[in-house]
Image (cartoon, rainbow, N blue to C red):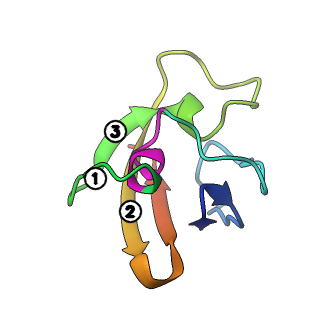
Amino acid sequence: MSTNEIIKWSSYNDSFPYKYIEWESKVNKLSYTWDYFNGDEIPAETEDVPAEAWFWNAYYVKKNDRVYEFNIPFKNYNSILTVLYFD
């Protein structure tokens, strides 16, 4: 969950290969979530993004790794819930 371009909290499933998203950090420019906060259109469907868009500080993420990103905006709260998954 992100509010005002800041990641507020995250949770993960044990089967998800990436485990760490830095709370209280700014949303990365490589994500559609960043586009949302900057007034750009975001996809209505799930789209893939570089894994480093969300896990930039994880040593095990490779440059070519991709994750799927789906966003649910909460405009009245200037927030967005981002669902990430790996295929």
Q: Amino acid at mark 1?
A: Ile
Q: Amino acid at mark 3?
A: Asp
Q: Which residues are magenta?
A: 30-36
The mark that comes first in sequence, 2 or 3, is 3
Circle 2 residue: 71
Q: Looking at the rendering, in which quadrant would you find the C terminus?
A: top left
| Secondary structure type for disc 1 | loop
Circle 3 residue: 48
Mark whose residue sits in front, 2 or 1: 1
51 left or right of 40 in image = right
* Magenta segment includes 35: yes
Q: Amino acid at mark 2?
A: Asn
Q: Residues within 10 Å of mark 2 (few under 14, many from 20)?
A: many
Q: Residue furthest top?
A: 63
- Vertical side of 71 occupied by 29: above or below: above
Say which quarter of the image contains residue 66.
Answer: top left
Label 1, label 3: how far apart the Cα atoms are:
12 Å
| Secondary structure type for disc 2 | strand
Circle 1 residue: 42
Mark whose residue sits in front, 2 or 3: 2
Q: Position of residue 62 (x, y in %)?
A: 59, 18
